[in-house]
Amino acid sequence: MADKIPGEVISPRIKDGVIYWRRNDVFKVNLILKLSSMGESYTLKEGDIVTVAFFDSGSYPIKQFSTNADNNRVILDFDKSITKLFDKGRYTYDISVELSDGSVYTIADDNVAVVL
């Protein structure tokens, strides 16, 4: 009788705001931002820039993605050159939005990412 291989959970995945992935995985993560201003829904406009920055446990910057959001959607592309920057361990990430008028808003601060 053959032994069963323990089942694994899907990688990458997001659970309760924590991004999990396996070391050396190559993948894309789609983030959909639900923004509001003064109680009203806000859709990012041309010229608005979203930045997602990852830091190691000592708050040292590892990788920063900056892009224009398409319909409040941001795609993070973890290709081979990016994923190799992350060893197994715990990281944090911040998400900020810079509007075309120069205003900057932090919408996520010290969220957790875990590389398994």
Image (cartoon, rainbow, N blue to C red):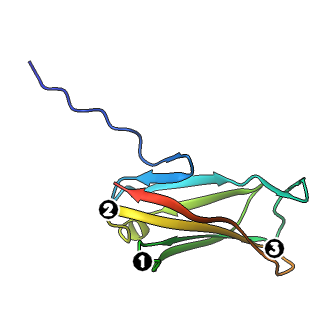
First in sequence: mark 2 vs mark 1? 1
Numbered mark located on residue 13 in the image: none
Which residue is disc 3 drawn over? Answer: 99
Say which of 102 and 67 sits in front. Answer: 102
The amino acid marked with disc number 3 is Leu
The amino acid marked with disc number 1 is Gly
Q: Residue furthest top?
A: 1
First in sequence: mark 3 vs mark 2? 2
> Disc 3 and disc 2: Cα gap in Å?
34 Å
Instruction: Please tell me whether residue 106 is drawn above or below residue 41 in the rendered image.
Output: below
Which residue is disc 2 drawn over? Answer: 88
Numbered mark located on residue 58 in the image: 1
Residue 9 as seen in the image, left or right of residue 106: left
Total numbered circles: 3
Q: Which residue is pictured at 38% across the width and 71% down the height?
A: 85
Residue 80 is situated, as x and y percent measured from the top left of the image, at 39, 65
Residue 29 as seen in the image, left or right of residue 102: left
Residue 88 is situated, as x and y percent measured from the top left of the image, at 32, 62
CB within 8 Å, label 3 to label 2: no
Q: Closer to the observer: label 3 or label 1?
A: 1
Q: Closer to the observer: label 2 or label 1?
A: 1
- Quarter of the rendering containing residue 51: bottom right
